Amino acid sequence: REKMLQWSKLVKIDTIEILGGEPTLHPRLWEWVAGLRELWPDSNLQITTNGTHFKKMKDFKKQLVRYNCNLQVSVHGNHFRKQLAKDVFETFGEITFTEFGLFGDSELTGSIWFKTDSGIDIEIQNGNNLQDICFIDNDFNLHNSDAKLAHENCGISRCHHMIDNKIYKCSIVGLLPEFLRQQGKNTNKFSPYTPLEADTITQESFDNLKHAIPQCSICPEGNSYCLLYTSDAADEEDS
């Protein structure tokens, strides 16, 4: 709480996304939502979920309305689409389609947005499409890109990550080293990254979040997306 209070005095945030794991499984989720709303009253607040559990939560819609919190559902697997639609309608009632977006320059649908009668924005994100970050020839490998070019074409270059009250440039530098260790991969090519801490942050280090860092070289120089589930697989799962 004290660390978050420090950060709230130091940074203004446009959008705060509560991620996981799966945030709807956390027993103190609404305490987090309430605390973030108190500290950043003007920020867009959003819970990002895989959509498998929110229907089981008591007063889920009521709590979102209470804290002016929106919802993003990342759908992984075609088999879940029908159940998700049912859960959304049963939880929120009537919803209105507002817009849709594509994955970068591709023709793949990225997200579809709806608004509830109580003003909650719901984004259904197509998790069947995976952005090519560290996949080469269908295996997990690190790129050797031009860091500045990779940064210019990165879709998450301005999506900073907070882990254990420390701010990381992005989710890749925050989470990838541990992922590599879990997968038994070599971490030597991943140069160490020092996250920002509220006690020691300077204006220079904060401004550097906007720029490329050496670790950007492990990502591709251009955006591309791969389809995780084919239409044939979807037909088989839905049948």
Image (cartoon, rainbow, N blue to C red):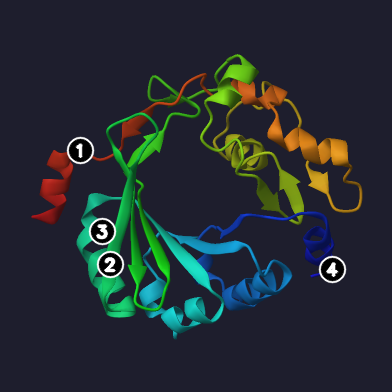
Alpha carbons under labels 2 and 4: distance apart = 40 Å
Give x and y (percent) for residue 157: 60, 35
Label 3, residues with CA under 10 Å away: few <14, some 14-19, many ≥20: some
Alpha carbons under labels 3 and 4: distance apart = 40 Å
Residue 31 in view in this figure: yes
Numbered badge on residue 2? 4
Secondary structure category for the residue under label 3: helix
Which of labels 2 and 4 is toward the front? Answer: 2
Q: Earlier in the sequence, mark 3 or mark 2?
A: 3
Give x and y (percent) for residue 174: 66, 42
Q: Which residue is mark 1?
A: 230
Q: Residue at x 48, y 66 (%)?
A: 70
Alpha carbons under labels 1 and 3: distance apart = 14 Å
Label 2, residues with CA under 10 Å away: few <14, some 14-19, many ≥20: few
Residue 27 in view in this figure: no
Above or below, comparing residue 43 to residue 142 in the picture: below
Secondary structure category for the residue under label 4: helix
Secondary structure category for the residue under label 1: loop
Decide which of 97, 142 is in the foreground and name it.
97
Secondary structure category for the residue under label 2: strand
Which of labels 4 and 1 is toward the front? Answer: 4
Q: Residue at x 58, y 73 (%)?
A: 29
In the rendered image, the quadrant that contains the N terminus is bottom right
Q: Amino acid at mark 1?
A: Thr
Q: Which residue is mark 2?
A: 96
Q: Which residue is mark 3?
A: 80
Judge left or right: residue 79 versus residue 140. Answer: left
Q: Amino acid at mark 3?
A: Phe
Q: Earlier in the sequence, mark 3 or mark 4?
A: 4
